Image (cartoon, helix red, strand yellow):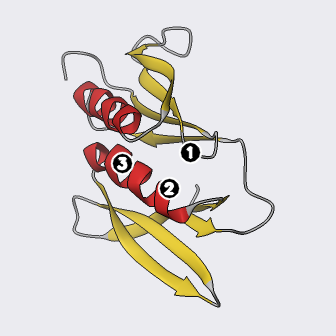
């Protein structure tokens, strides 16, 4: 089980704006945004239905070498949330890397969307539920 992931980025301000918009439809919010030893640190958290919260996605500014390119995927509660993730990510400067849709070669209900973030990482939102849910 993964507890968290940290990526080193070139421009924390661009990263903040991109992920604030892209992850909002998935229920994420900025939960940590500060400077440690002269380095900006940004953390995104998802509020769980049980009331708990965990920062699982971290970004660190101007740390060399920059991470990536890599692939990150967040689980979405619905196909509509996948669509909203993709639209928000594109509107905030992300590059389309796979429009929302079924990827039946993964499994019959795999509904995902892919976008390249400001550092060239391939980021994805996925819903594994059938269309009727």
Discs 2, 3 touching: Cβ within 8 Å = no
On-image quarter of the C terminus: top left
Query: Relative to 29, is 13 on the left or the right?
Result: right
Query: Residue 58, percent across and down?
Result: 54, 65
Q: Is residue 105 above or below residue 128?
A: above
Q: Residues within 10 Å of mark 2 (few under 14, many from 20)?
A: some
Identify which residue, 25 or 15, lies in the foreground: 15
Discs 2, 1 touching: Cβ within 8 Å = yes
Disc 2 or 1, which lies upstream in sequence? 2
Quote the CA–CA distance across marks 2 and 3: 11 Å
Query: Relative to 125, is 63 on the left or the right?
Result: right
Q: Residues within 10 Å of mark 3 (few under 14, many from 20)?
A: many
Disc 2 or 3, which lies upstream in sequence? 2
Q: Is residue 128 above or below residue 16?
A: above
Q: Label 1, on which residue?
A: 118
Query: Residue 10, percent across and down?
Result: 65, 59
Q: Nearer the viewer, mark 2 or mark 3?
A: 2
Dot 2: element? helix
User: What residue sits 41% from the left and 76% below the top?
Assistant: 32
Q: Label 2, on which residue?
A: 15
> Can you tell which quarter of the image residue 46 is in?
bottom left
Query: Residue 89, percent across and down?
Result: 39, 38
Q: Residues within 10 Å of mark 1 (few under 14, many from 20)?
A: some
Q: Which mark is residue 23?
A: 3
> Can you tell which quarter of the image residue 50 is in?
bottom left
Query: Relative to 132, is 13 on the left or the right?
Result: right
């Amino acid at each position: 089980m993964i507890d968290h992931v940290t990526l080193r980025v070139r421009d924390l301000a661009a990263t903040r704006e991109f992920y604030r918009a892209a992850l909002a439809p998935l229920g994420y919010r900025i939960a940590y945004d500060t400077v440690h030893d002269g380095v900006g640190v940004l953390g995104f958290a998802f509020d769980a239905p049980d009331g708990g919260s965990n920062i699982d996605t971290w970004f660190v500014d101007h740390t060399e070498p920059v991470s990536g390119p890599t692939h990150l995927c967040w689980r979405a509660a619905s196909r509509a949330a996948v669509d909203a993730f993709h639209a928000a990510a594109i509107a905030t400067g992300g590059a389309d890397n796979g429009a929302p849709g079924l990827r039946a070669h993964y499994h019959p209900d795999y509904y995902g969307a892919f976008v390249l973030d400001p550092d060239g990482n391939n980021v994805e939102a996925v819903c594994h539920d059938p269309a009727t849910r």
